[in-house]
Image (spheres, rainbow, N blue to C red):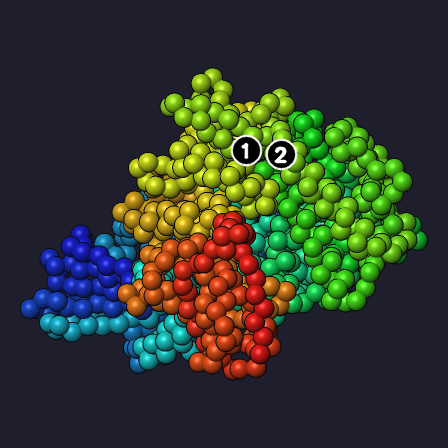
Amino acid sequence: MAQESTPDSSKVTIGPLWHKLERTHKDAGIELGAVNFVPCSNETVELMKVSVKNISRRSIRFTPTAAIPIFGRSLANKHDHEHVTALLNRLEQVKDGVLLKPTMAFNEEGHKDASTVYFVFGRQDKTTALAGTFPTTESFYGEGGSLMSPEAVMKNLEPAILPPSELQGKEAIGALRFKEITLKPHTSADYIIAVGMASHHQQAKDIFSRFDSLEAFERALSANKKFWLDKISSIQFRSHDEDFNCWMRWVTLQPILRRIFGCSFLPDHDYGKGGKGWRDLWQDLLSLILIEPHLVQEHLLNNCAGIRIDGSNATIIGTRPTEFMADRNAITRVWMDHGAWPLLTVLLYIDQTGDFDLLLQKQTYFKDPQLSRTMDKDLGWISQYGNHLLDKKGQVYEGTLLEHLLVQNLVQFFNVGEHNITRLESADWNDGLDMAFARGESVAFMSFYGGNLLKLADLMETLGKLKGQTTIRLAKELLILLDTLNAGPVNYDHAKDKRDHLFGKYFHSVQPVLSGEVVEAAISEVARDLRQKGHWMFGQIRHQEKITVEHDGQKYQWFNGYYDNKGERVDGIKDNVVRMTLTGQVFALMSGMADSKEIETVIISVDHFLKDKKLGGYRLNTDFGLKHYLDLGRAFSFAFGTKENGAFFNHMTVMYAYALYTRGFGRQGYEVLQSIYRMALDTWRSKIYPGIPEYFDSDGRGMYHYLTGSASWLVLTGLTQAFGVRGLDGDLLLAPQLVKEEFNSKALASVICPFAGRRVTVEYHNPKKLDAGQYSIQQVSLNGCPIVGKLLNKASVKIERSLITATPEAHIRVVLDAYKVNPAKGRTQDKMDLVMVGG
């Protein structure tokens, strides 16, 4: 009979992609340990070593059993035809365990031959075979039993080879019975267990043969540890707080998992069906650009094949390059923020690499029945037409990557609602704002698009100078969107005129096919048009969307984030309740729209209304006090403090910190990041492994740990803004905004990162322990040699790329000292001086 024992103590030890659980049962006199990992050598298998140690003073005799259920079919079959698909199972008992080979893959749209073998194998050592197996849940659990109380264990039943009739059509389990063993005091026994998939029986056996001894297991574990430590060592932060440095290494790991698994690879995640969405794709590339930019160019170009000529995009990415599909739920929708993210990612890539040629490479446009941002449908489109936009001659049209970026951002300038603000459409970054398609508007992302237009103008001019060209080639129809290049520009102050121009002229000219004509447009004129539009958007928001609220005897001011489906402003006071959205502030700052004084008032308002007094984190919005908000979105039907209704939503919080840093508010950006760090490390509340979850709820519990894109943003913010190590048109820019607490006892803080194909260490020396905004760069040396022989007296310095590539490894030391203000000119906090440092 089995004896139950409650553990006296449990301990979990973790490293990157390996996990160890230890439990002590003093009454039973045993200590149990289990180590799990997936080998880095490409086998489709998970390995586990279970150790049993006798910690008593007497010998202990026991019979070990390991059991792992084998579902062996699609996740969809857990909810659909679970019993019927079990009837397809065919099991085999072999020397090392249990094999499952279903007869076919069940799918009512078309059944297919099953090509996968599932297995659970085990060994104590090379010479000791299993005592036997229990291959079905029926034989192991017994009638009414369970995995926690299986009859085969509770009654210590002997395993047997089942007749073929009992190995068909049954739910499978890899229940392995090891041979009875007697452990003397202070001795231990180890057991190796493997769970995996293979294409045939022999491959399954071959995979296990590589790991079926303790020595082979330990070799694989050592190789696995080295592999993943190398991965997360690409970027290493070294500040005063060692716990923070360690935590950031775990955060660096998260984007790697996202790239492997997508954003929905765990069954408890609400995205459910897995795969990657458009927004995930671009933002997950941010960290890859910082680590391995040479791998990114092809991804960026391929991703642009998902852009439609109406500025929208396919929402699901296929498994092959340039393979895109519409929304995963086959619902016609368009997220208004999707066009904003690609430029941000492309700009980071160009700054890190100097690869301006990418902008001139050509790519197709995505085509499906959806027209005019879901407002119309191409009834003549059939699947045989294909998913590439054609011209009038039936040829696949290709435009430059720059043209794709222009389409995305120019369309959104004209795509406005009744308040002359960019339409919210099906939602923006906040997927929970999904019920205001008719009249909803997003002030937040209008800021983002306005900033993008200004950045595009700068980008084009830099491209022209580098390439020595004064014109760019564009589809003829884009001149409609570049209206100031034409004789009859649009009146931007009239929302209806802008919509008519977009829907009546531009969409009509590009759908369902393009003319195929290409024109040469002057870069200077296009840049002027873009700047005029970007500045108009900024002016519209600053003039119309400021919120002023009297609360507790004090005046607060911030920016409205949205209009709802009644055309009513969302932020402000309604029914004596203060409504404030963090999103509306983040992009007002990040885009460059808000000036320094406006930023200061926003910070005060955010700290007062959105910063939680108990937990210290920043909420996505205040409590609107609503049962639901059917004129804005599903988010407000969630309990307050969860998901998109007032949770501590880390993606937006990190972007808030990033925005503060980019505008020169380093101290405030640091405090925002620290709020996340403190909540994550408060493990009694957060109950998560090291890292950053999608959000913390009102109890401080971390939720959706690996679904979030905030990990990429956190690495980006820490490296490029706090430590200020980033590219600028391919050269290396150093613009630190570290606060005095981040320097160690020797007044040092450093970061290791890749740049220009070299391992670069940047070490800052702050002997006076000055705070962010108080110091300037005084001396710079590369591998011990001064780069410049005079005091820079500046907040940032640019080092030519050639100086980095000329050495196998670069160690840059930067000495910081007090910022000396020119009394005649003064200094603004959100502007940084730039000095070129050459050989």
Res. 242 in view: yes
Can you identify the residue that label 1 sits on?
Answer: 559
Asked if 181 appears above or below 454 in the picture, the reply is below
Q: Nearer the viewer, residue 731 or 112?
A: 731
Q: Residue furthest left?
A: 57
Mark 2: few, some, or many residues within 10 Å (few <14, many ≥20)? many
Q: Position of residue 249 (x, y in %)?
A: 40, 63
**Of pointers 2 and 1, the one earlier in the residue sequence:** 2
Say what secondary structure mark 1 lies in.
strand
Mark 1: few, some, or many residues within 10 Å (few <14, many ≥20)? many
Q: Is residue 771 left or right of residue 412?
A: left
Can you identify the residue that label 2 sits on?
Answer: 541
The residue that appears at 46% across and 48% down in the rendered structure is: 665
Q: Is residue 343 left or right of residue 7?
A: right
The total of numbered circles placed on residues is 2
Give the number of the disc on residue 273: none
Q: Nearer the viewer, residue 464 or 155?
A: 464
Find out whether the residues at labels 2 and 1 contact each other: C-beta distance under 8 Å. yes
Q: Residue furthest right?
A: 393
**Residue 172 falls in image quadrant:** bottom left
The residue that appears at 62% across and 53% down in the rendered structure is: 344
